[in-house]
Amino acid sequence: MTVADGHLKDLGGEVVERTIEGVGTLVFENFEAGQWLTKKNEPAKKARRRYLLDGVEMDSVSSIVDTLSKEALYYWHEDHGARGAVEAMEMGELEGVPIEEVVKHIRSLGLGAKAARDEGAERGQAIHAAFQTLAETGDAPKFSDYPKAWWPWVKGCARAWLTLDPEPIDAEFMVVNPAMGYAGRPDLLCFSKGKRTLLDYKTGRGRIFEQAHYQTRGYAEAFEPCSIDPPDRIVIVGIGDDGGPPLLEDSVVTPEDWAALLRTYRSRKRVNAAISAAKAEARKAAAA
């Protein structure tokens, strides 16, 4: 087994590297559980996704945006949890299962919110890859390359491309703002309708939430440090589950809004670290 920088090379994962003149070397690591090593030199039990600038970890745009409340997710989890329970019941899988074990059992069957989330993440990655292929080669996605359940999103991807008629500049590229201490990976920078445009795709039910407005502004604020000309427009592309026309929204978040969210994120990060440290000290004192 080959090990480098805590990464188990033989077990896969993704490592992307970009050298930015005048800034340094930016690395993105994307490892699932078991693909990287803990400080104890043991395979980790959880995933790790992080950006490193010359070996120093940067906050990620997605982590910063996660500071925002996602009320819609509460209903989504409730909906898919209930669906999973009904499916399990119809299969006869809940008979005799103690109530406190029901959720665990539903998950073991590949049902419920967690399974739906994982499937949605896989589908989202596939659609992003389709957009990247379009940007790099001009080849349209083929239905035969995807599960039939995903075809509406594939169709939506093609419709979005035709609507925007983009001339790609760069796709799935990494950016970093060293002064603000964060990095990210925008979907596409292009010329669209005569304007230099930053595009970000969202696959779901065609809805766009405030998080996407902040996310795209965060990306744009990292352009200048990377010597990338700023976009004239920042557009979020919502691709629904019906294969219909894409929903297009221009980001309304200002640089000041982004800086305010970043301050809040750092404040919460510091407070949560202090709380964890205090609890650890209390446990240590209780055990003494």
Image: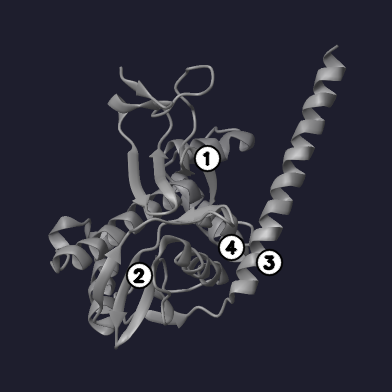
State which mark lies toward you, 4 or 3.
Answer: 3
Residue located 39% across and 67% down the image:
228
Q: Which residue is mark 3?
A: 260
- The amino acid type found where label 2 is placed reads Asp
Q: Nearer the viewer, residue 21 or 181?
A: 21
Q: Which residue is mark 2?
A: 241
Determine which quarter of the picture holds residue 155: bottom left
> Which quarter shows the N terminus?
top left
Which type of secondary structure does the marked residue at label 4 adopt? Answer: helix
Q: Which mark is first along the chain, 3 or 4?
A: 4
State which mark lies toward you, 2 or 1.
Answer: 1
Residue located 53% across and 17% down the image:
40
Q: Please give the label number shown on residue 56.
A: 1
- The amino acid type found where label 3 is placed reads Ala
Q: From this viewpoint, is residue 82 visible?
A: no
Q: From this viewpoint, is residue 259 visible?
A: yes
For the residues labelled 4 and 2, the Cα–Cα distance comes to 18 Å
Q: Nearer the viewer, residue 138 or 58?
A: 58
Q: Position of residue 281 (x, y in %)?
A: 82, 25
Residue density around tag 3, few if under 14, some if 14–19, many if 20 or more, within 10 Å:
few
Q: Which mark is first along the chain, 1 or 4?
A: 1
Q: Please give the label number shown on residue 75.
A: 4
Which type of secondary structure does the marked residue at label 2 adopt? Answer: loop
Residue located 86% across and 18% down the image:
286
For the residues labelled 1 and 3, the Cα–Cα distance comes to 23 Å
Please report contact status of discs 1 and 3: CB closer than 8 Å, yes or no. no
